[in-house]
Image: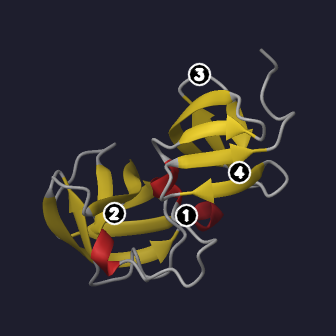
Amino acid sequence: MGSDLVTVGRVGKPHGLDGGFFVEGASARKGVFAEGATLYTGGEPATVVASRHGSGGRPVIRLDRDVERGAELSVERATLPGLTDEDEFYVFELVGLSVEEEGGRQLGRVREVLEYPGNDVLELDSGASLPLVEACVRQVDLAGGRIVVAVGFADPD
Protein backbone atom coordinates (compact mmCIF):
# COMPACT_ATOMS: atom_id res chain seq x y z
CA MET A 1 0.00 0.00 0.00
CA GLY A 2 1.48 3.31 -1.03
CA SER A 3 0.84 6.73 0.42
CA ASP A 4 -1.98 7.05 -2.09
CA LEU A 5 -4.51 6.01 0.57
CA VAL A 6 -5.61 8.45 3.23
CA THR A 7 -7.27 7.29 6.44
CA VAL A 8 -10.68 8.91 6.94
CA GLY A 9 -11.95 6.91 9.92
CA ARG A 10 -12.21 3.51 11.58
CA VAL A 11 -14.90 0.86 11.74
CA GLY A 12 -16.70 1.54 15.02
CA LYS A 13 -19.40 -0.26 16.93
CA PRO A 14 -22.26 -1.88 15.03
CA HIS A 15 -25.44 0.13 14.52
CA GLY A 16 -28.70 -1.64 13.76
CA LEU A 17 -29.10 -5.16 12.46
CA ASP A 18 -28.28 -4.54 8.80
CA GLY A 19 -24.48 -4.58 9.14
CA GLY A 20 -24.18 -0.82 9.53
CA PHE A 21 -21.61 0.68 11.89
CA PHE A 22 -20.49 3.99 13.37
CA VAL A 23 -17.39 5.54 11.82
CA GLU A 24 -14.96 6.47 14.60
CA GLY A 25 -12.68 9.49 14.12
CA ALA A 26 -14.55 10.30 10.93
CA SER A 27 -13.20 12.85 8.49
CA ALA A 28 -15.45 15.90 8.28
CA ARG A 29 -14.79 16.23 4.56
CA LYS A 30 -18.03 16.22 2.59
CA GLY A 31 -18.96 13.19 0.54
CA VAL A 32 -16.33 10.82 1.95
CA PHE A 33 -19.02 8.51 3.37
CA ALA A 34 -21.77 9.19 0.79
CA GLU A 35 -23.70 6.30 -0.75
CA GLY A 36 -21.79 4.96 -3.72
CA ALA A 37 -18.43 6.21 -2.43
CA THR A 38 -15.48 3.82 -2.49
CA LEU A 39 -13.61 3.24 0.76
CA TYR A 40 -10.60 1.01 1.20
CA THR A 41 -10.24 -1.29 4.15
CA GLY A 42 -7.54 -3.93 4.42
CA GLY A 43 -6.23 -2.63 1.11
CA GLU A 44 -9.38 -3.73 -0.73
CA PRO A 45 -12.11 -1.44 -2.06
CA ALA A 46 -15.61 -1.51 -0.60
CA THR A 47 -18.63 0.50 -1.67
CA VAL A 48 -20.80 2.47 0.73
CA VAL A 49 -24.33 1.10 0.23
CA ALA A 50 -26.05 3.07 3.01
CA SER A 51 -25.08 6.27 4.77
CA ARG A 52 -26.80 8.25 7.50
CA HIS A 53 -25.95 10.15 10.65
CA GLY A 54 -26.31 8.56 14.07
CA SER A 55 -26.11 10.03 17.55
CA GLY A 56 -23.81 13.01 17.90
CA GLY A 57 -23.85 13.48 14.14
CA ARG A 58 -21.38 10.65 13.59
CA PRO A 59 -21.66 8.89 10.25
CA VAL A 60 -23.27 5.46 10.23
CA ILE A 61 -22.49 3.52 7.09
CA ARG A 62 -22.93 0.05 5.64
CA LEU A 63 -20.48 -1.37 3.12
CA ASP A 64 -21.07 -3.98 0.43
CA ARG A 65 -18.93 -6.47 2.37
CA ASP A 66 -18.16 -7.36 5.96
CA VAL A 67 -15.33 -5.48 7.62
CA GLU A 68 -13.63 -6.00 10.95
CA ARG A 69 -14.32 -3.63 13.81
CA GLY A 70 -11.37 -1.30 14.32
CA ALA A 71 -10.25 -1.58 10.69
CA GLU A 72 -9.05 1.64 9.08
CA LEU A 73 -11.21 3.18 6.39
CA SER A 74 -9.29 4.99 3.66
CA VAL A 75 -9.88 6.82 0.40
CA GLU A 76 -7.59 7.42 -2.54
CA ARG A 77 -5.71 10.66 -2.08
CA ALA A 78 -6.57 11.61 -5.67
CA THR A 79 -10.29 11.63 -4.82
CA LEU A 80 -9.85 14.29 -2.14
CA PRO A 81 -10.76 17.77 -3.31
CA GLY A 82 -7.75 19.96 -3.95
CA LEU A 83 -6.95 22.51 -1.30
CA THR A 84 -7.42 26.05 -2.46
CA ASP A 85 -5.25 27.91 -0.03
CA GLU A 86 -1.61 27.27 0.78
CA ASP A 87 -2.51 27.66 4.47
CA GLU A 88 -4.83 24.67 4.21
CA PHE A 89 -3.72 21.14 4.90
CA TYR A 90 -5.21 17.78 5.67
CA VAL A 91 -4.78 16.67 9.25
CA PHE A 92 -3.22 13.35 8.14
CA GLU A 93 -0.42 15.31 6.46
CA LEU A 94 0.80 16.49 9.89
CA VAL A 95 1.71 13.00 11.15
CA GLY A 96 5.48 12.55 11.10
CA LEU A 97 6.31 16.27 10.90
CA SER A 98 8.85 17.57 13.37
CA VAL A 99 7.57 20.15 15.83
CA GLU A 100 9.69 23.02 17.08
CA GLU A 101 9.08 26.14 19.10
CA GLU A 102 9.75 29.59 17.73
CA GLY A 103 13.41 29.94 18.62
CA GLY A 104 14.22 26.42 17.48
CA ARG A 105 13.68 24.14 20.50
CA GLN A 106 12.74 20.68 19.15
CA LEU A 107 9.63 19.24 20.79
CA GLY A 108 9.36 15.95 18.90
CA ARG A 109 7.44 14.53 15.96
CA VAL A 110 3.68 14.31 15.47
CA ARG A 111 2.65 10.74 16.37
CA GLU A 112 -1.06 11.27 15.79
CA VAL A 113 -3.70 13.94 15.59
CA LEU A 114 -6.62 13.48 17.98
CA GLU A 115 -9.96 15.00 17.12
CA TYR A 116 -11.78 16.72 19.97
CA PRO A 117 -14.96 18.81 19.78
CA GLY A 118 -13.14 22.07 20.60
CA ASN A 119 -10.04 21.55 18.47
CA ASP A 120 -7.71 18.85 17.24
CA VAL A 121 -4.69 18.00 19.37
CA LEU A 122 -1.20 17.10 18.12
CA GLU A 123 0.18 14.13 20.09
CA LEU A 124 3.97 14.09 19.89
CA ASP A 125 6.29 11.10 20.21
CA SER A 126 7.85 12.95 23.17
CA GLY A 127 4.54 12.67 25.05
CA ALA A 128 3.64 16.34 24.65
CA SER A 129 0.13 17.31 23.51
CA LEU A 130 -0.37 20.59 21.66
CA PRO A 131 -3.68 22.15 20.62
CA LEU A 132 -4.08 22.60 16.86
CA VAL A 133 -5.20 26.23 17.20
CA GLU A 134 -3.88 29.45 15.70
CA ALA A 135 -2.59 30.75 19.03
CA CYS A 136 -0.30 27.72 19.31
CA VAL A 137 0.54 26.67 15.75
CA ARG A 138 2.44 29.49 14.04
CA GLN A 139 3.41 27.73 10.81
CA VAL A 140 2.76 24.43 9.08
CA ASP A 141 5.58 23.87 6.61
CA LEU A 142 4.61 20.69 4.75
CA ALA A 143 7.41 21.09 2.22
CA GLY A 144 9.97 21.54 4.99
CA GLY A 145 8.45 18.76 7.11
CA ARG A 146 7.94 20.86 10.20
CA ILE A 147 5.44 22.67 12.37
CA VAL A 148 6.47 25.79 14.27
CA VAL A 149 4.57 26.47 17.50
CA ALA A 150 4.48 29.37 19.92
CA VAL A 151 6.56 29.19 23.08
CA GLY A 152 4.59 28.35 26.21
CA PHE A 153 2.35 25.51 25.03
CA ALA A 154 4.81 22.68 25.66
CA ASP A 155 6.23 21.81 29.07
CA PRO A 156 9.53 23.54 29.74
CA ASP A 157 12.60 21.28 29.65
Of the residues under marks 2 and 4, which one precedes in the sequence?
A: 2
| Residue at 29 percent of width and 77 percent of height | 78
Image position of 52 (left or right of 139): left
- Specify whether 128 is left or right of 35: right
Q: Which residue is mark 1?
A: 58
Q: Which quarter shows the C terminus? A: top right
Element at label 3: loop
Residue holding disc 3 = 126
Residue 76 image offset from top left, x and y in percent = 27, 70
Residue type indicated by callout 4: Leu
| Location of residue 106 in the rendering, given as x and y in whole percent from the top left corner | 64, 29
Which of label 1 and label 4 is nearer to you? 4
* Sequence-first tag of 2 and 1: 2
Residue drawn at the location 77% of the way across and 54% of the way down: 133
Disc nearest the viewer among 2 and 3: 3
Disc 4 target residue: 132
Return the x and y of residue 116 as percentages of the image width and height: 68, 50
| Distance from Cα at disc 2 to Cα at disc 3 | 37 Å
Give the mark nearer the N terminus: 4 vs 3.
Answer: 3
Q: Marks 2 and 1, how far apart in space?
A: 12 Å
146 vs 109, nearest the viewer: 146
Depth order, front residue of 11/40: 40
